Image: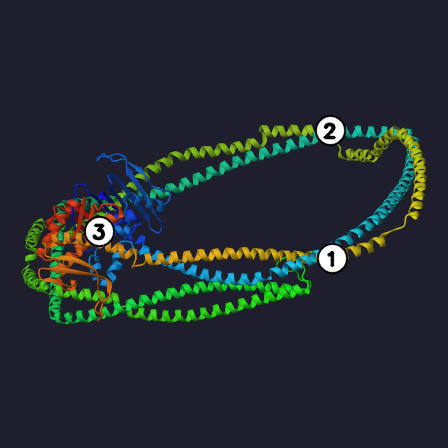
Amino acid sequence: MIPLQLNLKNFLSYREASLDFRGLHTACICGPNGAGKSSLLEAIAWSIWGNSRAGTDDDIIHTGTTEVCVDFTFQCDEQILRVRRSRQRGQTSTLEFQIATSEDELQVQFRSLTERSLRATQQKIIQHIKIDYETFVNSAYLRQGRADEFMLKRPSERKQVLASLLRLDEYDRLAEAAKERSRDYKAQIQLLQQNQQSLETQLEQREETLEAIATVEREILQQQQAQATDQDQLQQYKVSNHQRHTWQQQLSWLQSNLDQLTRECQRIEQEQKHSQQRQQELEELLGQEAEIHQKYSEFEQLQAQEQVLSDKLHAYQEAQKERSQLQEQLTNYLSDLKSQQQQIKAQLEALEQQKKELQNTLGQGAEVAAAMTELEAARTRLASLDQLQTKAIPLIHRRQIIQTEVVSRRAHTEARLAEIVSQINRLQVQQQTAVQVQQAVQQVSLQIEDLEKKRIYQQRVREKGLERRNFMERLQAQLRDREVQLADIEQKLRLLQVPDAICPLCDRPLDEHHWDLVAEKHQAQQQEFRNHIWVLREQLAVSEREIQLLRDEYGKLNRELAGSDNLQKQWGGLQAQLNMTATERERLQKIDREKAALERSLKTGEFAGDLYTELQQIERDLQELHYDEKNHALARSDVERWRWAEIKLAQIRDAEKRLQSLKNREPELVEKLENISNLIEREKTESFLHQKLVKLEQKIEQIGYDFAEHKAISAARNKAQVWLTRKEQLRQAQQDYPQVSSRVKEVTKRLLERLQDQEKLRQQIDLIQEKLKECPDQTVAIKNLEQQIAQRRHQLDLALAKLGQLQQQQKHLEDLSQQKHLIKHQIKEAKNQYRVYNELAIAFSKKGIQALMIENILPQLEAETNKILSRLTGNQLHVQFVTQKAGRSNKKDPKLIDTLDIVIADARGTRPYETYSGGEAFRINFAIRLALAQLLCTRQGTRLQMLIVDEGFGTQDRQGCDRLIAAINAIAPDFATILIVTHMPQFKEAFQARIEISKTAETGSQLLLA
């Protein structure tokens, strides 16, 4: 992976930053501590894998902003790829993945490879670059504080660290899974063997079951023959009774028809009576025909008179309506004219009021003229002072800047002096406590060794606890199965207590003998399950007590080991203090000299000599101008004090114009008022509306409508209206009379026919009643015979149920026999699987494949480490990895134990890693770490093309730094890009390409490519 372009927005301490890596081979990222050097590299890791040192993803967003975005372009396997990751505060991240479709350096075109989900896109990125985050930070990215992680571990723990780096912990998971599977198969074998023994006990009942089946089959055959004879006799009785039932149905049907016919005759008689009554009524109405015609003629005359009066009423109402409308129009028109008259009067009154106000304003003219003279004089004085201010302002501003700079320089010098005094005090204390630090290192080392022994014991306690917990989970599963089986047995026993209980296996009724057998069998199973449940609960109680003891012991060890990390840090800090004693003594002398120079500068004012000279010249220039800010402010206040005269003068001029306008408008309003008053008087007597009203009054008199006459004629017409109904009834009677006469004849004829049908039905009923007397009822005989057949059928059902039960039991025994053979085969397969997984657990363990892989990798790691170390030390140091050593035993041939000791040799022989100085230890750590990085990339299937070194080089002297620089330059051809993060001057000057990082509170981190 070769970086090409990195763009940052609101990432950690960066707001906006862009870095082009093209042309950079070996570059130094430099800047003060906390400026954001490591953050620049963290952005690369976050953009590709989404991982960073921050606690949460929101923590990487720059303070005060809501969105972060990192855009990283790089080359991998001759392809240009681009990753863009962004995030809104409090929301999920978004990820884009693109590949270049053209190699034009000026304008690169990209094609999207982004998947539908962030997880799928992340997986596709890893497939392209062939390296995940853990491999990256353990290979290409040498992060701060992790260079000595491998060396500081005890020999017994280094293999675990190496296994973790090589991702061998996956084999631990496989080994644990294989152990779990082997334990499961072992428990399965024990359960299958128990089931096999139970099946053999049940199969001993097979011969007794066959004999019982033969006996029951003979009983069933005898009962079936007797049942057939009774069935034939029952069939004969049913045929006879069926014929009798048929005749009874016919008799019932005929009787029903006779009743229906009787009701119909009664209905026809009623209909005949009603038709004759209607015929008589029509004859009476036809006899009144002459009277009805006379009364109807009188009604028509009254109706014509009423129509004439209704027409006059309509004309009268229309005229009254039109008169009301005209009166309303005249009233509204006069009201509008009076409203206009009032408006003009109000305008004239307002005009008079305005004239009085304007005349008052014009009376202030003399006072305003005197104030305007004062205003012009004040403005002249202010203009003169404004010209002096234009010349004095730059000098005043410069004086303020110089005074601020003098204060800043003094504060900076005093702060530096205070910092130096603090450093001198601290260094003097450290020089005095060197002996105590040496003693503290020895004491802490003994404590660390004791804690390491306790940590090993704690791991054994944890493994024992996990084993007990897995055993308890298996016991709990068995307990749940047994409790379910016990509940099933108890349910079957409760069903057996019910009278006439059926078999739980075949669902057939049980006799007393078989009931005893089934109950005894289920009670035995019930007791067996209870015993097993009791054993399981005892084992669970014992296991819980063991786990509690192990948990207490583990908690006790945890509390004792709680301070192990602090001891490690304390040991590292004490060791670093010892290593830095000589360097800090020289540093103390140098700081003393700097302190004396700073005190002299503060006393004489040398820290700001040029600024004091410039400040004196500015003061002389200001005195020559004779500019006074107080006089300037008084002049401005005078102008503001007389500015009211200018405003008042404008008001007087406006009042003169408005007064003349009012005088011009007043005659026009007086004339309009007189015209409207005259018009109102004329409209009351001479208008067109008034003349129309007079004509309408004359028209109403000509109509001559009389309301009393109209009311009398309407009452007479309403009273005579009954003859209109009588005339309609006469017309309807003339039409209906022929039909009613015909209906009377028809009903009489139909009544005679129904009486004849009634007599025929009575004769048929008498004939069927004679036949029923000749055929006796066999219902009692049928009932007795059916009871006998049912009793025999019940006995037959019991026998068949018993036979079914025995056959089901026989089939169950055959199934058990097959199940026995199947269980035998399952036991064989389980034993094979148990052996396979047991062997796999051994193979995947730390002493299996993992140990073999480490043994194969260590020679490569040792060769590559020594190759790099020879460049860093001038062939002065050599590293050897030892994986086995003789155990502590008095025997002649002691047993070899596994370890991972690192033997370091120099010109004086071999000695422990802890005895080397900080610079030498750092070079050894750097060589091993770089060799591990190359080895990890090789195992991942990719080539290490980029190297990032973010480690402190402060432990190196001048010669060690030169060798590190020479080593980095020596390995540079092996990499496309090397980035070194440091703040040391000699490293900054050793590389031509530098990425300088700076940070301020206003702009955040900024970078500059030099």
Total marks placed = 3
Q: CA distance from mark 3 to mark 2?
A: 122 Å
Instruction: Specify the label residue 933 is tagged with.
Output: 3
On the picture, is 267 further left or further right than 338?
A: right
Give the residue type at disc 3: Ala
The local secondary structure at tag 1 comes to helix
Q: Is residue 7 above or below residue 669?
A: below
What residue type is disc 1 on? His
- Camera-nearest label, 1 or 2: 1
Residue name at image x 60 percent, y 35 percent: 328
The residue wearing badge 1 is 794
Amino acid type at mark 2: Asp
Q: CA distance from mark 1 to mark 2?
A: 103 Å
**Which badge, 1 or 2, comes first in the chain's sequence?**
2
SS for tag 2? helix
Residue 864 image offset from top left, x and y in percent: 17, 52
Which quadrant, please, contains the N terminus? top left
Q: Residue at x 39, y 59 (%)?
A: 180
Answer few, some or many: residues within 10 Å of disc 2's Cα (few below 14, many 20 plus, some between 14 and 19): few
Picture quadrant of residue 705: top right
Disc ID at residue 725 = none
Q: Observer-nearest residue: 553 or 45? A: 553
Mark closer to the chain start, 1 or 3? 1
User: Which residue corresponds to mark 2?
Assistant: 311
Residue 418 percent across, percent down from the top left: 13, 63
Residue in front for this viewpoint, 406 or 262: 262
Image coords of residue 326 (percent x, y): 61, 32
- Depth check: 904 or 612 in front? 904
Q: Quadrant of the C terminus?
A: top left
**In the rendered view, would you say 469 is above or below 227?**
below
* Residue 525 visible in the snapshot: yes
